[in-house]
Image: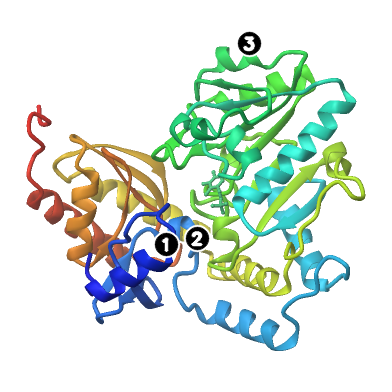
Amino acid sequence: MTYSDELKRRFQAAIMGNYGLPPVAIREGEGRRVTDVDGNAYLDMIGGIAVSSLGHSHPALVEAVSTQAARLAHTSNLYLHEKEIELAEKLLELSRVEGKVFFCNSGTEANEAALKLALLAGKQAGRSKIVAAENGFHGRSLGALSITGKAAIREPFEPLGREVEFVTYGDADALKAAVDDDCAAVFLEPVQGEAGVVPAPPGYLAAARRYTAEAGAALVIDEVQSGFGRTGAWFAHHAAGIAPDVITVAKGLGGGLPIGAVIAAGPHADALTPGTHGSTFGGNPIACAASLAVIDTIEREHLLDQVLDLGEHLDSRLADIPRVAEVRGTALWRGIALTEPIAADVCAALASRGVLANPVRPDTIRIAPPLTITRNELDECCDELAAALDEVEPTPGGRP
Ligand SMILES: *Cc1c(COP(=O)(O)O)cnc(C)c1O
């Protein structure tokens, strides 16, 4: 913790205790740097959990948000505004989906809507079971939580009143057995983010597509964390060559503004009929303007190609760092597994050295920096990581 005891006291007195005490109090940001309340600068290697795709205060985002705020901030869904149509058309183009879009405000809400959509479609076909993966994460509202495979965050709220079967992520045979006549939908992340950036093994997503198509169940791919350039593609599942029935997105789409969306193909595009779902803020003009600016900037600055090049550079640098056991993920989204469960200590050492990263698991550091990051900044991150790892003591008995 770098900020004053007074700020800590006020945080603890006014903010609910579900997050614990944050290590840094951020005041402002520019590019890939944020500055704390005491004026210390940090290289932002986590980007607000894969959200700040253009970094901080990007001129295109500032311009789009300010212009839209000055013109029209909100309509509700009682009225149409053109930006939501423009963004929906763009999402359909980038996702290569022939279908329709529903807008909401977060990843959780996108999965909540996808779940309602899948349950309605399933009901018509006499199917009710949802299949999801162990260690998967789809959100914390009661519907999204019911399909979240992290038992520790789900079990305190059970029973959740839904028939969900969890299967081992990556085991195609287990998935095949679970996708039966009663299965309405399968929810999968193409890379499990909150589990520590764990990619699906080769062939797994294609197998999921095959089994769901054969059984007549919907395949829902959760691209909330993996989408919008993180892996060097607009959508991570494009690398597997599959066409899902439903895709959920959020995080990096808005570049820091809250937005989520469900992209549904074919008959699934019409599963939400009048009155079945809604959102007061969904498709908010400012959030849509921000998302259009994010997409436009990624296209105009050829960031997807750049992200892939930077990813290769990152691979070569991380490979040389002692105490790094394995590097998972691709491009600018990595789980750096350490030889010991010291990720929290290493991230604390990194923060005091001016780099923000996230201990997503006791033994894994997650990085998901802005897509606009430079090679020099990645070098800086790797140098500081090596130094931080050098600084942190081995855990007693933890080191082989
Ligand atoms: C973060 C995340 C969510 C939840 O998104 P929120 O915007 O926090 O509601 C859902 N699915 C995945 C894969 C995520 O990474």
Label 2 CB-ligand 1 distance < 8 A:
no
* Amino acid, disc 1: Gly
Q: Are marks 3 and 2 in contact (CB under 8 Å)?
A: no
Report if the beta carbon of the residue with label 3 is closer than 8 angstroms to ligand 1: no
Label 1, label 2: how many angstroms apart (C-alpha)?
6 Å
Please determine whether, in this image, residue 75 is positioned above or below residue 229. below
Q: Residue furthest right?
A: 274
**Crowding near the residue tagged with mark 2, few <14, some 14–19, many ≥20 C-alpha atoms within 10 Å:** many
> Disc 2 designates what residue?
51
Q: Which one is earlier in the sequence, the residue at label 3 or at label 1?
A: 1
| Callouts 1 and 2 close, C-beta under 8 Å | yes
Residue 127 in the image, given as x and y percentages of width and height: 80, 21
The percent coordinates of residue 75 (x first, y second) are 80, 74
Q: Is mark 1 within 8 Å of ligand 1?
A: no
Q: Mark 2: which amino acid?
A: Val
Residue at 35% x, 64% y is 12
Q: Which residue is mark 3?
A: 177
- Give the secondary structure at mark 3: helix
What quarter of the picture does the C terminus occupy?
top left
Q: Is residue 263 above or below residue 300?
A: above
Q: Which label belongs to residue 57?
A: none
Horizontal side of 102 relative to 230 (left or right) equals: right
Q: Earlier in the sequence, mark 3 or mark 2?
A: 2
Give neighbour class at mark 1: few <14, some 14-19, many 20+ (Cα, 10 Å).
many
Q: CA distance from mark 3 to mark 1?
A: 38 Å
Q: Amino acid at mark 3?
A: Ala
On the image, numbered disc 1 is attached to which residue? 47
Dot 1: what SS? helix
Q: Position of residue 235 (x, y in %)?
A: 60, 47
